[in-house]
Image (spheres, coloured by chain):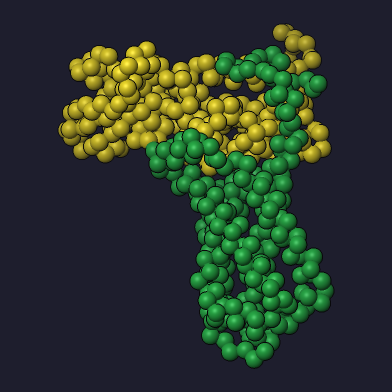
Chain colours: A green, B yellow
Amino acid sequence: MRTNWISLHHIPEGASVNLQKTLAKNPRWESGMELVQLVTGVFLLGFLQFHVMAVSTIILGAAAFNKDAQFLDEHYISYIGIPLVILAIFVHGLAAMRKAPWKFQEARVFLQHSRRLGHLDTWAWLVQIGTGMAVLVLGVIHIWSALLTWPIAAATSAARVQGGYFSFLLALLLVAEIHAMVGLYRILVKWSAYDRHKFVLHLIYATLFFVVLGLLALIVFLFINVKV
Amino acid sequence: MADRLLTLEIFRYNPLTPNIPPRMQAYQLRETPGMSLFIALNQLREEQDPSLMFDFVCRAAVCGSCAMLINGRPNLACKTLTQDLPDKITLMPLPVFRLVGDLSVDTGVWFRDLSLRTESWIHTDKTFEAQGLEERMDNPTALSIYEAERCIECGCCIAACATANMRADFMGAAFLNRIARFLIDPRDERPAAQVFEVVGTDEGVFGCIGLMACDDLCPMEIPLQGQLAFVRRKMALAGLWGK
């Protein structure tokens, strides 16, 4: 039994001490979950921006895109990276979801609280939960459809975008970028003392940069004519 | 601006008469120059409704008793001037804390628990020498301790916190700010690893989701973002390396 700094001396009014909670309580696990959420989140953020930049080589032409795809393929980066990303998405999802208001009553309290308060940062949490769910669903479909036509090449990607995937990919780009950048904002707020009113602008510019880059790549894919 | 006719919609509920359901009651009041909500509420109670319950002590933003939701946002009624508000003002009691009645809540028990649970005094093995020289402390340390100690225990940060609203056992910014104060203090010999056992939990700093309403709405403008981040870093390190 560990010695407890606080509750050995004082049990707050209305709180009860019982067997199951005393045995289940483990700050190492609880702080560990937070760190798992942080590490997988940063990893996925890095992956997303790398992915958007890699895909945007299509702007330079199909040859550049294919060369990049081949490089990642030949050096086994895709074969290590993709399983890691899938694993990270699920671990991150599970870790982050542990705090969401799953109980109906909690959700009602949160929504009424947000409406009363009219506070943008508080609403941003709802955005984070919503975009997180969307990324989970759309991301799985996206990975699946890319794996179906493996290996990655300009021709197959262009065929996908031209075959009706344009709006799907645009939606995924938007929710993923918003989720990633709101997440980065939250990480900086939670772990640093930097003035968030200042760095939020840089984050907005960065988000716009990646969204525009991704959109350009999608538009090029929509109109490019690639011979297989 | 003065001389407006203000409408105050006030939350009415007395837990001692549960047969009368919670409701919003509207009062009208002529605005006077420099009127604060402290003045407005006292005038209402004197002239219109002696049954109206609310708390005030110092009327100078020192005691922290008059915190309430003013148009949905927690703030001190004594510090809020009606001239900064629209014609229609809604007043509600702080959430999370036990409702005494109408606008009055019991923050006292909550903050007494905080002091007892954090054992808000210096823990040291050194014996105090009443006649000896006081130990020196460098100025930045003293200032950062003072920064945390400016908390007037009004409860606005707790009321503004989504997590505290959803989960009654969450410690909240006032609690974690107090933890920060003792973690900074070099005279306090409690190791961070010991603090971790209680604060490195989902009821403690890792339950915080960083929505920063506490930081935005603290009437004393305590930099709570930095205070919470400091405790979070300390607790993460204590969890990883045990110190």
Q: Looking at the image, which residue is at 36% across and 22% down?
A: B103
**Residue B212 vs residue B185: left or right?**
left
**Quadrant showing the N terminus of chain A:** top right
**Residue B104 vs residue B174: left or right?**
left
Q: Nearer the viewer, residue A198 or B228?
A: B228
Q: Nearer the viewer, residue A161 or A65?
A: A161
Q: Is residue B7 above or below residue A144?
A: above
* x and y percentages locating residue B127 in the rendered image: 78, 11
Q: Looking at the image, which residue is at 57% across and 72% down?
A: A214
* x and y percentages locating residue A85 in the rendered image: 72, 60
For this orientation, the residue located farthest to the bottom is A227
Q: Quadrant of residue A68?
A: bottom right
Residue B38 in sight from this viewpoint = no
* x and y percentages locating residue A158 in the rendered image: 60, 81
**Residue B182 vs residue A160: left or right?**
right
Residue A90 in sight from this viewpoint = yes
Q: Looking at the image, which residue is at 74% across and 37% down?
A: A29
Q: Is residue A112 above or below residue B34?
A: below
Q: Nearer the viewer, residue A197 or A106?
A: A106
Q: Looking at the image, which residue is at 52% across and 47% down?
A: A125
**Quadrant showing the C terminus of chain A:** bottom right
Q: How many marks?
A: 0
Q: Is residue B129 above or below residue B209?
A: above
**Residue B97 vs residue A4: left or right?**
left
* x and y percentages locating residue A213 in the rendered image: 57, 73
Q: Is residue B173 above or below residue A55?
A: above
